[in-house]
Image (spheres, rainbow, N blue to C red):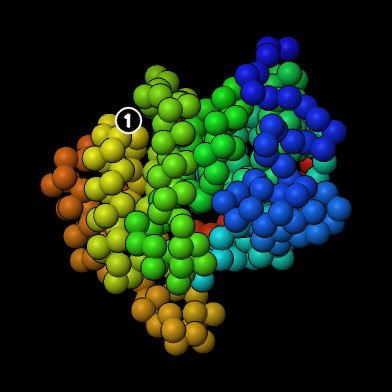
Amino acid sequence: MEKIKNWCFMDNMEWEGISSDPCNLCPRECMAGREHGQPGYCLMDNRVFVARAALHMWEEPCISGKRGSGTVFFSGCNLRCVYCQNHEIAYGKKGKEVSISRLAEIFLELQGKGAANINLVTPDHYILQAAQAVLKAKREGLKLPVVYNGSGYEKKEVIKNLSGIVDIFLTDFKYMDAGLAASYSNAPDYPERAKEALKEMVSLTGAPVFDEEGMMKKGVIVRHLLLPGHKKNAKDVIRYVYETYGDQVYISLMSQYTPFDRLKEKPEYKELGRKVTKREYQTVVNYAVELGVENAFIQEEDVAQESFIPEFDGEGVDGQDKRY
């Protein structure tokens, strides 16, 4: 087996200085005893729960392509986004427990189904187990690029250890406004943490690499979901990412914000009770173009629909495509 720098296997699944018990895997550093059944801020203990493992056609073109991305949706999340599209799994209400061995099998099964890559969705609180599963799957024949699909609220110390494990970072950059981060995600330190994590991601992957079919094999894609009424925050994110990294990263501008009924019951978030307008989104896209951004993805109209959110029904988790 090839030696992976800064990686070692331990019974308690720890990196040096990084631990899931007491847990300091994410910027929350909640110090929960997750190995002893105590849920962390992410609402999960150390048992790995997966809500869906299937081909997904709705990621960026260089991630999904014609074959689909092999997405593995993990339960739990270290943010508390009031507008979360994956609310059911973010709050741990959906998911089935899997072992590290079973997780490695899932990766190989997705490869067998023709997936373009293995896409780990919100893996930060399970990253130690997910990393072990990736390495096990590689020993058993996994050849696909591995995508870390996260919220951007990551620890730079964790990202540093993902060399040889993760090939592509598909990361959110939600806020440059700390006030919005505090109000909408209970994470006032989000902007600084996202900057630190992104720097490590770009350092780890280098310039983007694509195959002959235009599929990304290595690199960073920064996603920003435009929120209704918050064009300035979007522009600030775009400007920071582009002025800092230029064409080293791709920027994905998303208009798919979906206002769920649960927000209508919260008057303090009344501004989030509508979709993003065509004019709002076009203004942000025009800003990116004027800034000089060339490596970017934009969305077509009518993507703000609940039908674009996967069914978290356990597909692919059991190995025989059983649903819950």
In percent of the image, x 66 and y 48: which residue is there? 24
| x and y percentages locating residue 23 in the rendered image | 71, 49
> Splitting the image into 4 quarters, where does residue 160 fall?
top right
Left or right placement of residue 99 versus residue 179 in this view:
right
In percent of the image, x 71 and y 65: which residue is there? 93
Which residue is situated farthest in the top direction here?
A: 2
The N terminus lies in quadrant: top right
Kindly tell me whether residue 303 is visible in this rendering.
no
| x and y percentages locating residue 177 in the rendered image | 35, 62
Which residue is situated farthest in the left direction here?
A: 290
Which residue is situated farthest in the front direction here?
A: 17
Q: Does residue 259 lie above or below 7 as drawn?
A: below
| x and y percentages locating residue 324 in the rendered image | 78, 59
Kindly tell me whether residue 22 is visible in this rendering.
yes
In the picture of the structure, the residue carrying the numbered disc 1 is 248
Q: How many marks?
A: 1
Q: Does residue 71 lie above or below 262 as drawn?
A: above
Task: Name the amino acid type tagged 1.
Answer: Gln
Left or right placement of residue 315 versus residue 63 in this view:
right
